[in-house]
Image (spheres, rainbow, N blue to C red):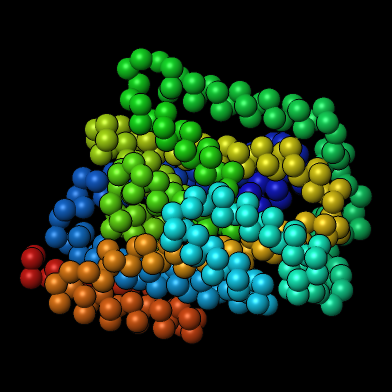
Amino acid sequence: QQLATYIGWLLHGTKGGLAAGVLFVLPAAVLLTVLSAVYVSFGHVAAIDGVLTGFRPAVVAVILAAVLRIGKRSIHSRFSLAMAVGAFLALELHIPFPIVIVVAAMAGTFGAQVGIPGAAGRATPGHASAKDVIGGPFVLDDDTPTPPHARATAGRASKVFFTCLFAFAAVCLPLILIQGVPRALGEMALFFTGAAFVTFGGAYAVLPHVSHYAVETRGWLEAPEMLDGLALGETTPGPLILVVTFVGYVAAARTIGPSAGVAGAFVATWFTFLPSFLFIFAGGPFVEEARGTSWFSAPFAAVSAAVVGVIAHLARDLAPAVFVGDTGHVVFSSVLFVLAATCLVRRWLSVPSVVLAAGLAGFLTTWNAW
């Protein structure tokens, strides 16, 4: 979503960034809100429960496939492997996710300074232009002068900051200060804002943080419901992080009442994505100025490696909800997991295809109930 916003902003300024960023998310957010309402209202129906039972082992397989895929790119030395294992163990010891990310970045910086092999990130054979890699021509390429609206100025950055601060306060303060507004909505606003600032590594990396808070800390959802939300996120268009829309809907419906579900979905989505526009509109000009520099490569390489351990821990947290139960359930889930993992690792099928096929298999197990 930030990439879409960045492209729109670079081409057409603030209006282009808003159009690209909002429209990249809005249709899927609406669809996921509708699916969340169906889930809360009809999730107990045998057929839908069967579909969800099929989804869950497939989602664990998706997460483990992501561990392998991201690990191949991020783990290339003993140092990066240590970052991944350390992150997994840190979460196992209940160290908060943001601290894990900060420590990994600091370790990468320190390791590069003292010359630990692999700490500076994987060496590249030299800079190649986009034309050499992809072809052309481009509207903007490596040799195009920076557009006027993409030049860094303190005044522009300040204007963006205070505009986003106003957009945050205009929604958040009423949720917190006005009597009669359920307290849970204010808690969601603050939590999802904080989560947006630690989304290093994408959705798979931040979901353990969201899952831990929503399931274990606040008790908004149960672990199987978190898996169901991931499955719905995988089978709908838009970025996977939109699973927060599902979390917000179910959390509000369960803690406040069914009529509050839409409000919870809106709060979770608004406060998750609002910081993205701050990052792009305020930080994009500085990124354009810093293109080609490598001073930040070491901390980000370490964070990328740590993210592998974070995602692996998410699979470890969610697996008991799939593989614990009566013998028939465990056997069914195990077979689906193995088949889904094989298809994903060997790239025989796409992620949505695997999840939907697993859901169909779960549905077929409920045939007698019909």
Q: Residue furthest top?
A: 179
Location of residue 117 (image quadrant)? bottom right
User: Which of the pair 311/45 is nearer the observer?
Assistant: 311
Left or right, 7 with respect to 219, comes to right
The residue sitting at 37% across, 35% down in the picture is 264
Residue occupying image coordinates x 74% and y 65%: 111
Give the residue at x 86% y 59%: 292
Q: Is residue 15 visible?
A: yes
Question: In the image shown, does 82 or 289 lie closer to the viewer?
Answer: 82
Picture coordinates of residue 88, whole percent (x, y)? 49, 65
Determine if residue 73 is in view: no
Residue shown at 26%/71% (left/top)? 323
Q: Is residue 160 above or below residue 76?
A: above
Q: Locate residue 198, reporting x and y percent.
A: 57, 48
Is 266 left, or right, of 76 in this rendering? left
Say which quadrant the C terminus sits in: bottom left
Residue 144 is situated, as x and y percent measured from the top left of the image, at 90, 54
Above or below, comparing residue 332 to residue 366 in the picture: below
Number of labelled discs? 0
Residue 66 placed where, x, y %?
50, 70
Using the image, determine if residue 10 lies above or below residue 191.
Answer: below
Q: Nearer the viewer, residue 216 or 176?
A: 216
